Amino acid sequence: MIFAAFLMAAAVQMNCSDAATQTDMNICSYEAYQEADKALNKSWEKAAASAREQSPAAFKRLRDAQRK
């Protein structure tokens, strides 16, 4: 948990287009992962809401497909 906070704090000050060391690349990679995870979660919420509007069975199919 402390390491994640350190990475986030360091990533704010870093120019990821010019990452030169492995540590820099790790920090930038973590930042990119966090952004991608947020986008994926937003997409899932949108798809889940749409499926829930259709029917409980539609949501179950979506959830089952997501877990495979």
Image (tube, grey):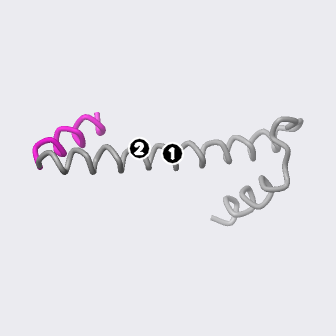
Q: Residue furthest bottom?
A: 2
Residue 64: in magenta span: yes
Q: Give SS at disc 2.
A: helix
> In the image, is residue 7 above or below residue 30?
below
Q: Are the residues flagged by discs 1 and 2 in contact, CB closer than 8 Å? A: yes
Q: Position of residue 39 (x, y in %)?
A: 51, 45
Name the main secondary structure of what is drawn in magenta: helix
Pointer 1: residues within 10 angstroms few (<14), some, or many (20+)? few
Residue 59: in magenta span: yes
Identify the residue at image location x=29%, y=39%: 67
Q: Position of residue 42 (x, y in %)?
A: 44, 49
Which residue is tagged 2?
43
Image-quadrant location for residue 28: top right
> In the image, is residue 17 above or below residue 2?
above
Q: Position of residue 59 (x, y in %)?
A: 19, 45
CA distance for labels 1 and 2: 6 Å
Which residue is tagged 1?
39
Image-quadrant location for residue 12: bottom right
Q: Which mark, residue 63? A: none
Left or right of 61 in this view: 44: right
Q: Position of residue 51 (x, y in %)?
A: 21, 44
Residue type at mark 1 is Ala
The residue range painted magenta reads 56-68
Pointer 2: residues within 10 angstroms few (<14), some, or many (20+)? few
Nearest to the observer: residue 48 or residue 14: 48
Identify the residue at image location x=87%, y=38%: 21
Residue type at mark 2 is Ser
Left or right of 48 in this view: 1: right
